[in-house]
Structures are given as C-alpha cells and as structure tokens.
Amino acid sequence: MFAGSGALGLESLSRGAKKVVLCDNSYDAIRIIKQNIAKTKTENQTIVINKNFEKALEIVPENNRKYVIDNFIKVSD
C-alpha cells in the first residue's frame, strides 16, 4: 500500500520475497513503479494496483496477504 516508487517492494524481492503487491492511488507513482519493475526485470514477481488502499484490499484475497517489514528502520534514542 502507498507504494510510491516501489523501492521498498522491489528491495524486498532482492532480499528473497517471492512476490510483492505494489499499490498506489497516483497514476504518476504507478508509471514510475512500472518503469522500476522493468529496470529490475521483476515483472513476474510483482502485482501493480492503481487504486486506493481500500479497493486494493478488496482485490487481494485475505488468505494471500502477508505483510512483513522487519529491520526496516531502527531509531536510536
């Protein structure tokens, strides 16, 4: 959700994720995401959805959803 450039999802593919769903409501963001997918040759591992997050959650079946963000940002005191 809120994929932006798709960098986080594409990075997760490079670290072993089998498939990612990239969703953004912005047409400009989707255009950039598709360019980045082509550059990284990950067309077969990505699903791109140009809808708001509520509609995207209706499209992706609940039993196929698994969201894991681990060690993404570590903030020190």
Image: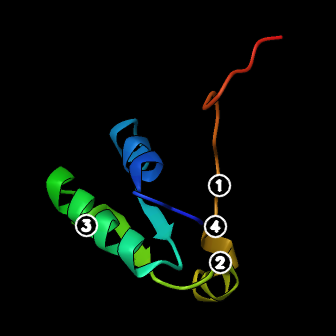
How far separated are the C-alphas under marks 2 and 4?
A: 13 Å
Tell me the SS state at disc 3. helix
Disc number placed over residue 53 in the picture, else none = 2
**Residue drawn at point x = 51 percent, y = 72 percent:** 23
What residue type is disc 3 on? Asn
Above or below, 67 against 48 in this view is above
The answer to which of 12 and 28 lies nearer the viewer is 28
Q: Are marks 3 and 1 in contact (CB under 8 Å)?
A: no
Query: Percent position (x, y) of residue 44?
Result: 25, 66
**In the image: residue 59, left or right of residue 14:** right
Query: Percent position (x, y) of residue 27?
Result: 40, 81
**Residue drawn at point x = 40 percent, y = 57 percent:** 5
Residue on which disc 4 sits: 65
Residue on which disc 1 sits: 67
What residue type is disc 1 on? Tyr
| Residue 14 lies in quadrant | top left
Q: Label 4 neighbourhood size at 10 Å, few (<14), some (14-19), many (20+)? A: few
How far separated are the C-alphas under marks 4 and 1?
A: 6 Å
How far separated are the C-alphas under marks 2 and 1?
A: 14 Å
